[in-house]
Amino acid sequence: MSDPKARLAQAVVEAREAKGWSGPRLARAAGSSTATIRAFKDAGTGFRGGDCARYALEEALGWTPGSAAALLGGHEALTVPGLDRSPRPSE
């Protein structure tokens, strides 16, 4: 996949699906909205949600900080073994 934005979007979807999460569940785990998640996937480096939102999404997916930038640069996302940001049943 040569388009960096498409690569990032695909990685987000794959990581979310690997956790068995829906889009809204990922948004809850990241403390965000589904619109913010969509904007992140669609905008790539042009994401205006801020570093905090980017970091929260990376953390929810189990990625290390900077993984989104790595994906946009043609590298892989780095994961944190054992990190589980699954929303609690009441969330």
Image (cartoon, rainbow, N blue to C red):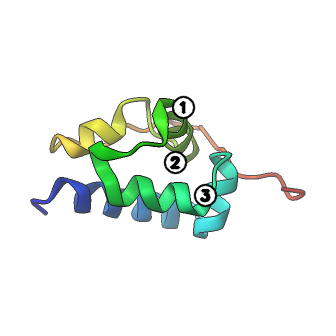
- The nearer-to-camera label among 2 and 3 is 3
* Disc number for residue 6: none
Residue 90 to residue 46: above or below: below
Q: Which residue is drawn at 61% across and 58% down?
A: 26
Dot 1: what SS?
helix
Give neighbour class at mark 3: few <14, some 14-19, many 20+ (Cα, 10 Å): many
Q: Mark 2 points at which residue?
A: 61
CA distance separating discs 2 and 3 = 8 Å
Specify the farthest residue to the left.
2
Q: Can residue 21 be seen in this view?
A: no
Could you say which is closer to the camera, residue 3 or residue 20? 3
Verify CB contact (< 8 Å) between mark 1 and mark 2: no
Residue 63 rendering spot, x and y as whole percentages: 45, 39
The quadrant in which residue 72 appears is: top left
User: Looking at the picture, which amino acid does disc 2 mark?
Assistant: Leu
Could you say which is closer to the camera, residue 33 or residue 15? 33
Q: Is residue 43 visible?
A: yes
Please give left or right for residue 47 compared with residue 23 in the image.
Answer: left
Which of the marked residues, 2 or 3, is nearer the chain's N terminus?
A: 3
Verify CB contact (< 8 Å) between mark 2 and mark 3: yes
Q: Residue at x 54, y 31 (%)?
A: 52
* Disc number for residue 26: 3
Q: Mark 1 points at which residue?
A: 52
